[in-house]
Image (cartoon, rainbow, N blue to C red):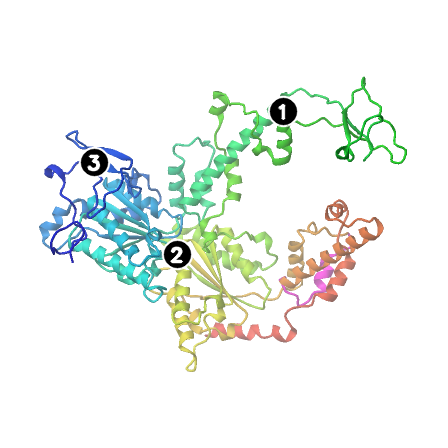
């Protein structure tokens, strides 16, 4: 079949381009017309100058870029850059590979994967900038159209364009949107696009075109496996969530040209931002800069207001009667319902004829009339005042810088992408939020916190392998709180997984979900993975068990102690049914530390009540409340039961107070009730009533189930 623009029945060559003039390649890129391109009306043009001072005019193309970023601008990705240097040197020196006569060694396709904001797009630009190549860039979803065959033709056209600009880098962003697996492809068009992309990649490889295809994706598992073989996207580079050292590098690179106070402790900020990717750190610095500017604007506005002389405006008196005109004045229908607004001063008053049937309506405004700027200041806030703009002096601008307190505020406002995308983040529970359980705290500190704090010493003694801990005991005893607190205390990321939520009815999906959890944890390391209700995920295997359950258990065991190292990933499991757990989950190297979280005793209950009530300050307790007596009356209560008891007592107190205010003072609105809360305290009577409603959640019969099971576990 003849190709457009060619005569005769020549063989179709999708990458054939017109020869370059003078048989010499210019040092700057030349924008050439595509093969078979139809003539179009004149458009704006850009001039490109060759070494011989000839000017070639080419159309401006939004896909064509000359990136200025290089690997020097990339921070926190040293292992990735090392891998890229190793790959790209074969493209820079192809003559060395040709000398060996072992085929084309230059990389043809590179797939960059990682969470959003991790720097994939920036790294792709740096690849082109480092190699001083033209970049042909497009977002994969942009080529999809509703016309059959048009999407495939657009894709072929883009590859022809890349060949025309060779040596070049063809950058495909979000490639997973057009390269779904065959089994996941919803339309035949998607399958055709994948087939076309394969064909174009194969042609580049077979014809040894000097084009490197770089693609990015957030989910490499969704990319068609046929595209990930040799000759296509044969090199896959994973960009994970940066660790503390990498975050420090990124922060320093992002702030190297900024006016940041020398008092800012970058090491401390890097330590307090686990789970942050490069985009999050950039947003953090930008937010701190905005806060610094707001601080200066607030100070300037306050200074301007203090310098303005205080003025007293004359009072405004509105006099008149609805529907009554002034005496002796003809009345029209339109004036019937108007009021006479007059400016009254002490030296000038006007009398209005009285109207006997209706009393005069007089409204006197004694407050000064606010200016438009002051009105905007009060109504919309300081930062929306745009009137009367006063320029800042050079000395004021010279003093402007980002201070440590600006970063403190910014850290509270910027949420890491890891948290938004379902990844890990640091919990907000500390040891102070947990009453009692001191023995369990010591075990967790020894098994998880110390290997982080004294990593060098542990590594020297060969004891740096991360531990796994199984917390078992009755429900509501604080197992989840313990896991969150230990992650917070060590500054670790935290991933909480409910056991049943990983189970899926489709074959292989449950195992895939388990793999993804551990992959997320490795990318977010150091990290704590907390499996709540782990008995639903790894029940005891038996001859009569289903194959699906056995596959999930096997996958879980493999991730805990398999071929791929866990790095600094600590696993904590929680269950109130230890008797149904598979014994293999508790062998050394997996969840080998078993801790029993029992119902609190008398002293522990008193400690928990002190913690819940913040030592009697929240909610405020009356003097007749004795927490020791309440602890004595709550035998068999769990920590969750005690929390519910305090909440119920506070609710009963507030409910009765609202009823009293409504009946005695006629107060019922929320803001009115808020003004009568200063002396409100929770009394002993409220706790007595709450004890009648809140009963222990663990029955006497169920309490005896856990100790025998724990003894059985220790034997196995």
Q: Quadrant of the N terminus?
A: bottom left
Q: Is residue 193 magenta?
A: no
Left or right: 236 as drawn, with respect to 681? left
Question: 10 Å neighbourhood of mark 2: few (<14), some, or many (≥20)?
Answer: many
What x and y, as percent, mark residue 634?
A: 70, 65
How far is the residue under mark 3 from the one under mark 1? 58 Å
Nearer-the-camera pick, 604 or 232: 232
What x and y, as percent, mark residue 696?
A: 67, 68
Q: Quadrant of residue 103?
A: bottom left
Q: Which mark is residue 522?
A: 2
- At mark 2, the secondary structure is helix
Label 2 or label 3, whichever comes before in sequence order: 3
Pointer 3 and pointer 1: residues touching (CB < 8 Å)? Answer: no
What x and y, as percent, mark residue 597?
A: 56, 65
Label 2 or label 1, whichever comes before in sequence order: 1
Q: Quadrant of the C terminus?
A: bottom left
How far is the residue under mark 2 from the one under mark 1? 55 Å
Residue depicted at 61% across the width and 57% down the height = 435
| Residue wearing tag 1 | 305
Residue 593 position (above or below residue 677):
below
Residue 84 position (above or below residue 389):
below
Q: Quadrant of residue 21?
A: top left
Residue depicted at 50% across the width and 33% down the height = 403
| Residue wearing tag 3 | 28
Of the two numbered discs 3 and 1 in the rendering, the one whose residue sits closer to the viewer: 3
């Amino acid at each position: 079949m003849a190709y457009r623009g060619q005569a005769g029945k020549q063989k179709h060559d999708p990458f054939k381009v017109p020869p370059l003039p003078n048989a010499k390649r210019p040092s700057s890129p030349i924008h050439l017309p595509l093969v078979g391109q139809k003539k179009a009306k004149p458009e704006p043009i850009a001039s490109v100058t060759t070494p011989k001072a000839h000017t070639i005019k080419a159309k401006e193309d939004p896909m064509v870029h000359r990136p200025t970023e290089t690997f020097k601008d990339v921070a926190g990705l040293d292992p990735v850059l090392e891998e890229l240097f190793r790959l790209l040197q074969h493209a820079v020196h192809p003559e060395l590979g040709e000398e060996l006569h072992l085929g084309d060694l230059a990389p043809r396709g590179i797939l960059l994967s990682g969470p959003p904001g991790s720097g994939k797009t920036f790294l792709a630009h740096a690849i082109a900038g480092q190699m001083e190549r033209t970049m042909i860039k497009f977002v994969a979803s942009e080529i999809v159209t509703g016309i059959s065959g048009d999407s495939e033709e657009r894709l072929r056209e883009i590859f022809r364009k890349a060949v025309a600009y060779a040596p070049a880098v063809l950058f495909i962003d979000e490639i997973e949107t057009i390269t779904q697996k065959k089994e996941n492809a919803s339309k035949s068009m998607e399958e055709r696009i994948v087939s076309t992309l394969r064909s174009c990649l194969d042609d580049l490889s077979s014809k040894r075109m000097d084009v490197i295809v770089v693609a990015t994706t957030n989910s490499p598992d969704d990319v068609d496996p046929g595209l990930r073989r040799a000759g296509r996207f044969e090199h896959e580079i994973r960009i994970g969530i940066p660790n503390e050292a990498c975050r420090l590098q990124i922060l320093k690179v992002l702030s190297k040209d900024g006016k940041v106070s020398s008092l800012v402790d970058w090491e401390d900020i890097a330590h307090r931002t686990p789970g942050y990717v490069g985009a999050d750190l950039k947003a953090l610095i930008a937010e701190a800069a905005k806060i610094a500017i707001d601080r200066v604007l607030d100070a300037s506005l306050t200074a301007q207001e203090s310098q303005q002389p205080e003025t007293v405006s004359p009072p405004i008196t509105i006099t008149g009667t609805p529907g009554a005109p002034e005496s002796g004045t003809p009345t029209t229908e339109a004036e019937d319902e108007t009021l006479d607004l007059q400016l009254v001063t002490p030296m000038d008053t006007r009398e209005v004829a009285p109207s006997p049937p209706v009393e005069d309506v007089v409204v006197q405004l004694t407050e000064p009339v606010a200016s438009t700027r002051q009105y905007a200041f009060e109504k919309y806030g300081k930062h929306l005042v745009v009137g009367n703009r006063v320029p800042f002096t050079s000395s004021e601008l010279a003093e402007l810088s980002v201070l440590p307190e600006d970063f403190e505020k910014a850290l509270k406002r910027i949420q890491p992408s890891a948290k938004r995308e379902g990844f890990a983040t640091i919990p907000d529970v500390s040891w102070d939020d947990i009453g009692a359980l001191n023995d369990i705290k010591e075990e967790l500190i020894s098994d998880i916190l110390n290997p982080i704090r004294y990593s060098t010493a542990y590594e020297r003694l060969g004891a740096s392998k991360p531990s796994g801990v199984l917390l078992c005991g009755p429900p509501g005893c604080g197992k989840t709180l313990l896991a969150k607190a230990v992650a917070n205390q060590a500054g670790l990321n935290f991933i909480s997984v409910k056991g049943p939520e990983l189970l899926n009815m489709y074959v292989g999906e449950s195992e895939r979900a388990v793999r993804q959890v551990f992959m997320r944890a490795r990318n977010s390391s150091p990290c704590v993975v907390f499996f709540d209700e782990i008995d639903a995920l790894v029940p005891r295997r038996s001859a009569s068990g289903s194959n699906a359950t056995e596959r999930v258990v096997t996958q879980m065991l493999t991730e805990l102690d398999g071929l791929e190292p866990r790095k600094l990933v600590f696993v904590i499991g929680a269950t109130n049914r230890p008797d149904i757990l598979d014994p293999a989950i508790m062998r050394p190297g997996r969840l080998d530390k078993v801790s029993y979280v029992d119902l609190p005793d008398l002293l522990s209950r008193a400690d928990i009540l002190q913690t819940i009530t913040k030592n009697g300050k929240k909610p405020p307790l009356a003097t007749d409340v004795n927490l020791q007596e309440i602890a004595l009356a709550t035998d068999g209560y769990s920590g969750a039961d005690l929390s519910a008891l305090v909440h119920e007592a506070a609710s009963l107190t507030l409910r009765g107070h609202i009823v009293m205010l409504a009946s005695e003072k006629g107060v019922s609105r929320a803001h009115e009730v808020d003004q009568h809360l200063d002396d409100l305290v929770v009394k002993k009577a409220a706790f007595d009533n709450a004890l009648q409603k809140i009963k222990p959640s663990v029955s006497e019969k169920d309490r005896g189930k856990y100790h025998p099971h724990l003894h059985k576990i220790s034997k196995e």
